[in-house]
Structures are given as C-alpha cells and as structure tokens.
Image (tube, helix red, strand yellow):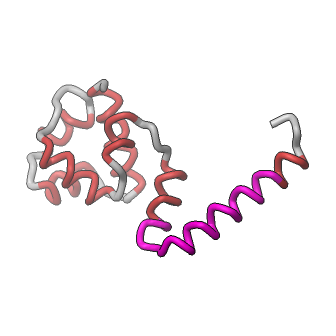
Amino acid sequence: MDKKNVGQRIRAARERNHWTREELAEKMDLSVNTMAEIELGRSGTRLENLIRLCRLLEVSADYILFGDVGPAVQRVTDLLRDRDEETVRVVEQTVEALLRALDAQHPEN
C-alpha cells in the first residue's frame, strides 16, 4: 500500500463529491493541513479515520487502499448494495447478456 496512491484516491473521491479539502477536513474534524498531508501521501491516517473517510466519500476501503475498484464499479456496487438477491441476480444476468452482445458486435475487444 503506497500512501501517495491512497492520498490520490482520497482526493479523487473528494473531488467527485464536489468538496474542497477544507470541507472534507471539517467533516472529518481534522485540520486542513492534516487533510493535505494525507492527500499528498506524506501522512497516513488511523483506521477509524479511514472508515469515516470511506463512509463520507461513499467508496470502499479496498478502493482507497488498493485501487482495486474503479469509480464506475464502485457506483454499480453502491446501486446494488441495498437490493434483494433476486434483483442483483437479474442485474448480473442482464449485464452478462449485454457484454456478450457487445463482444459479438466487436470481437476485437
């Protein structure tokens, strides 16, 4: 886990929420300087602050820490989070069918 990459993902998530660094620092009850140090990768943060950041920014800890999940995947995950299993299954089947159709139209992808 690279603090610089973590900081960049925090900043990107903050900007997607249209918040300034000052606004996020206030919501986190941190100083603007501390928030800047985190975003610039010069400082880490405690686990409880990481959890609060993820909740405020509406992103997973996996995305912040490892970058494994991009914003588009995160948005889909968020859309499905509170849905019942049947709805998730239907969405999954629909996406699979759509991707098969797209692959058939553009086999080079």
- Whether residue 67 sits left or right of residue 29 in the image: it is right
Q: Is residue 88 magenta?
A: yes
Instruction: Tell me where the magenta segment starts and ends, as one range.
Output: 79-100
Residue 104 in the image: above or below residue 68: below
Residue 68 in the image: above or below residue 49: above
In which quadrant is the C terminus drawn?
top right
Residue 9 in the image: above or below residue 51: above
- Specify the quadrant of the image occupied by residue 58: bottom left
Q: Residue at x 31, y 34 (%)?
A: 6
Q: Residue at x 9, y 55 (%)?
A: 29
The residue closer to the viewer here, 99 or 86, is 86
- Residue 98 placed where, x, y %? 77, 58
The residue closer to the viewer here, 44 or 80, is 80
- Residue 54 placed where, x, y %? 28, 52
Q: Is residue 99 magenta?
A: yes
- Whether residue 44 sits left or right of residue 9 in the image: it is left
- Whether residue 25 sits left or right of residue 89 in the image: it is left
Residue 87 in the image: above or below residue 46: below
Q: Residue at x 37, y 59 (%)?
A: 17
- Specify the quadrant of the image occupied by residue 57: bottom left
- Specify the quadrant of the image occupied by residue 64: top left
